[in-house]
């Protein structure tokens, strides 16, 4: 077992890879009572075309199948559900599917061994059949119908459709109604047998637990399973154009006030000489400084009563940096003008940089008071970098104004998409 010291934080993460090939990360916190466990599969909604075993043939499955499997996996061979099992211990179990991965997670305070063993069992012991698949279709379609009526969902996916030509991020994680209806048991089994293998998964456990116990439980559990040979799947990569699809588009929905999203799309190739960890930290600082709660722009828009709400995010989507502002306003034209102007004139002062670094450093330290936050952060790091980051605090503290300005110069503010969600007209 490897002990990974998180520099500057006085924290240690324990790492090992069990014999079945699954990486396991454990962070111990004996100041809390509970344990948060996350078993993650490197398979999400965008992975609809793939090949395996080094062959050139691509298989294509319906959109939404990752989410479909997440639902089905909770059914046990004896007719009960995983939720029924955990109710006996007062444990909380759930799951979620994203564009990039599927995660099954549980929070427990007693009988950790039984809880973790069953997490590994129900996720890695499928009991799919046609009756179950057909029954679940109706449940998912009902869930899908409710999601489609949510204005924020409409705005989100329409905006991604305006940003991306080929990437599957513009498609709903649950798929469309026809995708769900067309999903077969054979599709389910193909995806499960291809991707649900310990070599394509990872386990993260955070909380009051002995790291050696975690490794031992995982090792012994997986050794008992009759695992098929790993098929080494390769997901099809799409060549995405640098341009946006639509510069501006408007839709209508059940909202009282107009909501809008504006994003700048920049190829990561613009930043090829910048450390990937630094790039994530720097772009976060840029967004906070220019569009965050204490930014001059937000204070100006609030003072002029031009908007009710504003949030800023940045994400890394395959080969692109996406910087997005979401606003609720009754004056979309005025707000869009101000946001565009700010994107064209991104800036950071030395004094502001120091304040933002100090605040971000404090947030990193405080995060270790919450076992769920630490677990979620570790999930993101493993998915992004293939491992956890040992020196995030050092990276942050070493950022200079020169680093910031170098990144700002590479951001393509001319490549921008705006999506406006207006109230429906009576």
Image: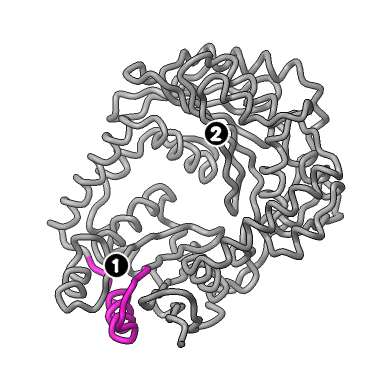
User: For the point 43% across and 80% down, which residue is it?
Assistant: 423
Q: Helix, strand, or loop for circle 2?
A: strand
Say which residue label 2 marks.
105
Does the magenta-highlighted stretch encompass residue 295? no
Please state the extent of the stretch shown in magenta in the rendering: 326-347
Q: How many marks?
A: 2
Residue 336 at least partly seen: yes
User: Which of these two is toward me, 252 or 408?
Assistant: 252
Q: Residue furthest front?
A: 426
With 231 as the anchor, is 96 left or right in this view? Answer: left
Label 2 neighbour load within 10 Å: few <14, some 14-19, many 20+:
many
Residue 272 locus on image (x, y percent): 47, 59
Q: Where is residue 145 shown, x and y percent of the image? A: 63, 63
The residues bearing labels 2 and 1 have C-alpha atoms spaced at a distance of 32 Å
Q: Which mark is residue 309?
A: 1
- In the image, residue 324 lies at what x, y percent? 40, 67
Answer with mark 2 or mark 1, whichever residue precedes in sequence: 2
The correct choice, above or below, for 370 with respect to 294 in the image is above
Task: Determine crowd level at label 1: few under 14, some 14-19, many 20+ residues with C-alpha closer than 10 A.
Answer: few
- Secondary-structure class at tag 1: strand
Which residue is farthest left? Answer: 351
Report whether 75 appears left or right of 52. Answer: left
From the top left corner, tell me how far across and down residue 175 is, in percent: 68, 60
Residue at x 12% of width, y 56% of height: 351
Question: Can residue 198 be spotted in the picture?
Answer: no
Seen in the picture, residue 70 relative to 157 is either above or below; the reply is above
Left or right of 302? Residue 233 is: right
């Amino acid at each position: 077992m490897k002990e990974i010291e998180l520099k500057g934080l006085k924290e240690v993460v324990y790492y090992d890879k069990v014999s079945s090939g699954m990486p396991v990360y454990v962070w111990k916190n004996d100041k809390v009572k509970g344990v948060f466990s996350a078993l993650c599969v490197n398979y999400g909604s965008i992975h609809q075309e793939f090949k395996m075993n080094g062959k050139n043939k691509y298989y294509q499955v319906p959109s939404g199948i990752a989410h479909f499997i997440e639902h089905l996996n909770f059914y046990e061979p004896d007719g009960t559900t995983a939720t029924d099992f955990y109710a006996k211990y007062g444990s909380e179990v759930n799951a979620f599917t994203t564009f990039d991965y599927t995660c099954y997670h549980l929070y427990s305070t007693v009988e950790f061994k039984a809880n973790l063993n069953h997490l590994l069992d129900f996720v890695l012991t499928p009991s799919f059949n046609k009756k179950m698949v057909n029954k679940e279709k109706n449940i998912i379609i009902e869930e899908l119908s409710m999601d489609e009526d949510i204005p924020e969902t409409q705005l989100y996916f329409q905006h991604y459709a305006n940003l991306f030509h080929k990437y599957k991020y513009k498609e709903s994680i649950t798929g469309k109604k026809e995708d769900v209806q067309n999903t077969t048991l054979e599709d389910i089994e193909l995806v499960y047998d291809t991707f649900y293998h310990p070599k394509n998964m990872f386990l993260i456990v955070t909380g009051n637990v002995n790291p050696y116990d975690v490794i031992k439980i995982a090792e012994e559990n997986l050794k008992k399973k009759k695992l098929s040979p790993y098929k080494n799947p390769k997901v099809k990569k799409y060549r995405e154009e640098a341009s946006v699809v639509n510069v501006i588009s408007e839709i209508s929905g059940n909202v009282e006030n107009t909501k809008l999203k504006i994003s700048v799309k920049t190829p990561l190739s613009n930043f090829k000489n910048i450390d990937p960890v630094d790039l994530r930290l720097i772009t976060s600082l840029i967004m906070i400084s220019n569009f965050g709660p204490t930014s001059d722009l937000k204070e100006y828009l609030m003072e002029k009563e031009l908007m009710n709400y504003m949030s800023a995010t940045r994400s890394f989507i395959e080969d692109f940096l996406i910087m997005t502002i979401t606003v609720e306003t009754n004056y979309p034209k005025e707000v869009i003008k101000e946001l565009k102007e700010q994107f064209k004139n991104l800036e950071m002062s030395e004094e502001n940089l120091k304040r933002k670094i100090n605040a971000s450093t404090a947030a990193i330290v405080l995060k270790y008071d919450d076992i769920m936050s630490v677990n979620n952060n570790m999930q993101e790091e493993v998915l992004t970098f293939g491992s956890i980051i040992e020196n995030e605090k050092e990276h942050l503290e070493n950022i200079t104004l020169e680093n910031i300005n170098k990144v700002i110069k590479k951001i393509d503010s001319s490549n921008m998409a705006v999506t406006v969600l207006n109230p429906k007209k009576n």
